[in-house]
Amino acid sequence: MKIIYIEFFGYFAAILTTLAFIPQLIKTLKTKKAEDVSLTTLIMFLTGVSAWIIYGIQISSKPILIANIITFLLNFLILVFKLIYSKK
Amino acid sequence: MKIIYIEFFGYFAAILTTLAFIPQLIKTLKTKKAEDVSLTTLIMFLTGVSAWIIYGIQISSKPILIANIITFLLNFLILVFKLIYSKK
């Protein structure tokens, strides 16, 4: 199978699982609450995504690396806003 | 770097980003609502995870493959219960 074809799925996956968290962030900002979003899920997910970043560096997989850096940032923002809104 | 050391981060990442969705599923089942969880996020994420499964097969990465199959199942259940509870 051509390398370019394999990479397509990697980038397609990376783009979707990364952009997927933008609607969650927008929803949280709009409704000013994320009560139903699990805090434990966010913390475990951020820890796991950090490990994916290390793995991506080690196996030299750009899709894994780029996707997980952006995924980390978006989920970190969701976590921050969840905590801010829960205190109000 | 030793292969076994590289694989450690892959499996650690895979386990965490997979198990991360269990607390969300439990929370959704307990509170019987997932109103704050974005539907668009769930649909985009499930589509992306499907593409990661294909990529995992293509680059022969067991951590990517196993993690994404279980991640898909857990998020699919979260989506199903979100829809069930939103109709009540």
Image (tube, coloured by chain):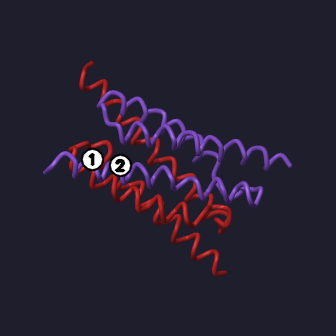
Chain colours: A red, B purple
The chain to which mark 2 is attached is: B
Mark 1 belongs to which subunit? Answer: B
Residue A48 position in % (x across, y down): 40, 57
Q: Is residue A88 above or below residue A17?
A: below
Residue A4 lies left or right of residue B24; in this view the side is: left
- Element at label 1: helix
Residue marked by disc 2: B11
State the residue in front, B51 or B3: B3
- The amino acid beneath tag 1 is Glu
Q: Residue lying furthest right in this view? A: B88
* Element type at mark 2: helix
Residue A88's quadrant in the figure? bottom right
Q: How far across and down, in percent of the image, does residue B3 sit?
A: 19, 45
Residue visible at 27% across and 18% down in the picture:
A1
Question: In the rendered view, does B20 fall on the left or right side of A66?
Answer: right
Amino acid identity at mark 2: Tyr
Toward the viewer: A52 or B2?
A: B2
Q: Which residue is mark 1?
A: B7
Q: Quadrant of residue B35?
A: bottom right
- Mark 2 near mark 1, Cβ–Cβ under 8 Å? yes
